[in-house]
Image (cartoon, helix red, strand yellow):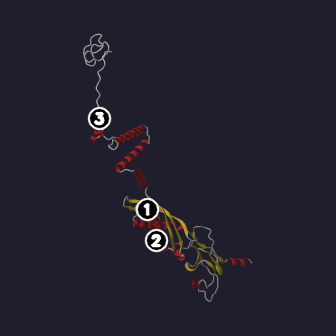
Amino acid sequence: MALFQMIRNQFIEVIEWTDNSQNTLVYKFPVRGSNIKMGAQLTVRESQAAVFLNEGTVADMFTPGRYELSTQNMPVMTALNSWKFGFNSPFKADVFFVNTRQFTDQKWGTMNPVMMRDSELGVLRLRGFGSLSYRVSDPVVFLKEIFGTSASFETGDIANHLKSLVVSALTDYLAEMQVPAFDLARYYDEIGEGVRKKVGGRFDAIGLKLTAVLVENLSLPPEVEKVLDQRTSMGVIGGGIQQYAQYQSVEAIRDAARNPGGMAGAGAGIGAGAAIGKMMSDALNSPAVQAPQPTQATQAAQPTQMSQPTQNPRPAEGARFCQGCGAALSPGARFCPQCGEPIG
C-alpha cells in the first residue's frame, strides 16, 4: 500500500494556480521530481495563461478554461516527445502561469533632472513623477525576452527597466512638444498620452501592453520656483522693474534685520532702519507724491484781500509824546493837539 501511494505521489494529476498576491507576473508550478500524468486536469483562471516548456523550449500555451491533458490538445508536446498512436504516458515539463491582468499604479519618476529648453527661461532642469499601467499581452514573448526560467517574477523585478523607458520617452516628447514651462500643467494628459504612444512599441517588443501613462507633477528647480514666486508677488501688487528692484531691496534689508549677531546684528538693525527710512523719505519726496504748486491761473482765481487801515495807538496817560503822531504833549492834556487822539 505504501509503495502504491509513493508511486501515485510521483504523478501530478491537478495543475492550477490561485494567485494570492497583487504583484506576481509569472509563477512556476512546482513539478520538480514529479511527472505529469497524461489526462491530468489543468485549470487556467481568468487573467491567466499557462505555458508548457519542454527541455527549455516553449511547447503549448493554454488560455483560460479547464483542460484534460492529452496528446490531442498538446500537439507541440506530442511532436517533441514523438508520441504516436495516442500513447498516453507520463511526461516531464515545466509549467508557468502568467498573470495577464492589468497592473495599475506602477510608479515612475526621474532619478536625474530632464533637460528642457524654454523660450522665456532658457535651459531648465525638470523633475517629474507619475504612474503607469500595463499588462502581459504575449506570454510566450514575455517568457523568452524577460522572464527566463526563474521560480517567480514580480513587478518589482522589471520596474526600473520600465521607468527608464518612460523617462526616456518623456524627454524626447517634451523636446518635440516645445511647451513653455509656465504652461506644462495644462498639458499633463496630453503629455501622458504622447509618451504612451511613443514608448508603446518598446513595450510590445517584450510582450507587454502599456495601457496608460499618468503625469502627476513636473516641477522646476527650487531656485527657479523662488524667482517665479517673487515675480507672481510683484504681479499681484503691480509695478515695473524699478518697483521690483525696490521690493528686492526691502526683502534683503528685512532678512538682514532678522539676523541678530551681537554688535554686528545691532549695526545691521540700525542700518536697516536707516535704509528703510531713506527709502520712505525718497518715496515721499518724489514728484509723484509732492503737493502741486499753484499756477498763475490758480493765483488769479483766488480772491484778493483788501488791506485795512492801520489805527494809531492811543497815547498813554502821562506820556510826553503821542504814540500815534509823535507830537509833544503838554502836562494834563486830555487830547493830542495834532491828531486829536484821547490820552489815557
- In percent of width and height, residue 286 lies at 33, 42
Image side of residue 71 versus residue 255, left or right? right
Location of residue 92 by image quarter: bottom right
| Front-most of residues 95 and 106 | 106
Tell me the number on the disc at residue 22. none
Tell me the number on the disc at residue 197. 2
Comes first in the chain, label 2 or label 3: 2
Q: Are marks 3 and 1 in contact (CB under 8 Å)?
A: no
Residue 316 sits above or below residue 63 on the image: above
The span from disc 2 to disc 3 (Cα, nearest Å) is 87 Å
- In percent of width and height, residue 203 lies at 49, 72
Secondary structure beneath label 1:
helix
Comes first in the chain, label 3 or label 1: 1
- In percent of width and height, residue 227 lies at 40, 53
| Front-most of residues 208 and 121 | 121
Residue 206 sits above or below residue 307 on the image: below
Between disc 2 and disc 1, the foreground one is: 1
Instruction: Spot the residue most to the bottom.
Output: 85
Residue 311 sits above or below residue 302 on the image: above
- 10 Å crowding of disc 2: few (<14), some (14-19), many (20+): some
Is residue 132 something that shows in the picture? yes
Image quadrant for the C terminus?
top left
- In percent of width and height, residue 244 lies at 37, 49
- Residue sitting at x 47%, y 72%: 200
Tell me the number on the disc at residue 184. 1
Secondary structure beneath label 3:
loop
Image quadrant for the N terminus?
bottom right
- The residue that label 3 is drawn on is 304
| Front-most of residues 64 and 31 | 64
